[in-house]
Amino acid sequence: MLKDRIDILLGVLLLICAAAAVALLTGQGSQASQSNMAVDKALERDIAYQAKVSFLERLYAPVSELQQAEKLETALLKLDELSRHYPDEAHGELLRGEILLQMQAVPKAIEHLARAVRMSGDYVDQNSPLSRRSMINQLVDVQLPKLKAAATQQTTGRLQATLKDLYYLQGRLAGGCE
Amino acid sequence: MQFLRILLVGTLLLSLLACQQTGERPVMKIGYMNCNSEEETMKRFQPLTKYLSDQLNVDFQAIPVDTQDFPERFAAGEFEFTHTNSLVYVIMREEQQIELLATEMRGNYGSHTAGTIVSKKGSGIKTLEDIKGKRMIFGPQLAPSGYLAQYDLMLRSGIDPELDIAYYAIPTGSFKHEKVAYAVYFDQFDVAALPALDLELMTRDGKITAEDFNILGQSPIFPYCTFGARKDVDPELLKKFRQVLVDLSEAETVDYQGESLKVLASAWIDGFEALSDSDYDLLREMAKRANMPPYQEF
């Protein structure tokens, strides 16, 4: 069958072409599969995020309802109750901060809001369904000048801690890194 | 002869050095207001007292004091430093010119607290107006968030506690605030005057749920338990005392009776804040309206 060197050479070339074609086809398949996997991962991430948002909304619905009804003291108690199952959870911290702010307990409100943002950037992300960016922005705008002025009169560890939290929130609003 | 002189001088120097090293620290006393019992007070505050002793090079001794006896025992000079509720601080400030050191932080409102008026869910008592003609239970009389704040809240809402409610009582013994909560929970009374902090702690401990009570009203927030000192204590020591308290972090420990204890956690405290005496003005206004000490008139 392989009578001379030319036949052998042609045979080898044919084999090389066949191997190249196989490799090319396999490579395309893998790219397509990788692309599919990427789509799956993005989908999974989005589904997980939607599930998280939906779960948080459902979990904290009684708190939000009490908050809207201006039953702020009971709303705090409901948060205390939920914190038995989910201690130091970011959304609970955020709601506690919001409620304390409504009750004019400003330093504690700032402490909880900063803690919430440290745990989840969603609260300063304009595109997140959990965003509280405008509220936090307003808090920083109103409280920062007041606290800076107070710090010139009297410097206490607590005041410094509150100022530090406010600067942190300001930094996160500006898109700064920690 | 030369050798003897050197030996004598050396011995004298060593003796002086030894005296300096073993020199006793001054002894001072801190009166701690009992919340529930002397035993509980000592268990809570002895590690903090030891920590203060270590930091300030003073031998502080913890003295448990009944709330009612506090101003009198302080006036008699039984202790230099005080840890009391904010109303007792105001009383001693007015009567003894006590120095404000630092305010304790605990619970949702930090260095502040509030008084609430509650009824049992399902009782039909939903507003402050509904408490007229009902049976009410208060906390102890000198409790700013268990008695004064609610008494004042009622007065400001047009309800005279002496005339408009059918009957009111104060429980005896220890754990008065919890007794007040359970008195309403188990239908012995219709309405209760409860500190917001106790509602919070009982909910966190799972003793009650947020749905068990209607909160009919809550006072504005005012300063919580307070460290003070006699006006004649060395100002430098007062400054250091205050600084040690406000610098205390959750992680700080003290060696106490063979154990290393977290100072704040063992005292059930979240931290301390240096407030101004003017922060207590809200409480003073409440005491004046309610005709309570130190402004009581007969």
Image: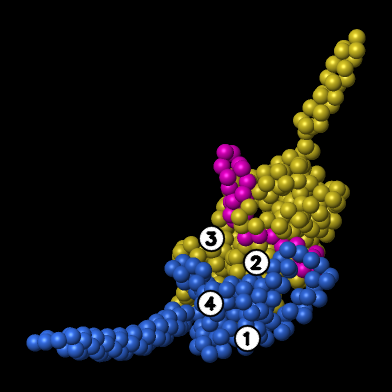
Chain colours: A blue, B yellow
B269 within the magenta span: yes
Q: Circle 4: is it few (<14), some (14-19), or many (20+) Cα within 10 Å?
A: some
- Residue type at mark 2: give it: Gly
Residue A106: horizontal and vertical position, in percent? Answer: 68, 75
Residue at left offset 18%, top offset 85%: A5
Q: Which mark is residue B178?
A: 3
- Residue type at mark 1: give it: Met
Residue at left offset 48%, top offset 62%: B205
Residue B128: horizontal and vertical position, in percent? Answer: 60, 79
Residues at discs 1 and 2 in contact (Cβ within 8 Å): no
Look at mark 4 in the image and give the residue it sits on. Answer: A120
Give the mark toward the camera: 1 or 4: 4
Q: Circle 1: is it few (<14), some (14-19), or many (20+) Cα within 10 Å?
A: few
Q: Foreground: B30 or B129?
A: B30
Look at mark 1 in the image and give the residue it sits on. Answer: A135
Q: Secondary structure at mark 3?
A: helix
Q: Foreground: A51 or B42?
A: A51
* Distance (Cα) linking label 1 and label 2: 22 Å
Q: Give the magenta part as a residue range.
A: B253-281
Please tell me which of labels 2 and 3 falls first in the chain. 2
> In the displayed structure, would residue B90 be above or below residue A121?
above
Q: Secondary structure at mark 4?
A: loop
Q: Circle 2: is it few (<14), some (14-19), or many (20+) Cα within 10 Å?
A: many
A33 to the left or right of B253: left
Q: Secondary structure at mark 1?
A: helix
Can residue A98 be seen here? The reply is yes
Look at mark 2 in the image and give the residue it sits on. Answer: B110
Asked if labels 1 and 2 share a chain, the reply is: no
B223 within the magenta span: no
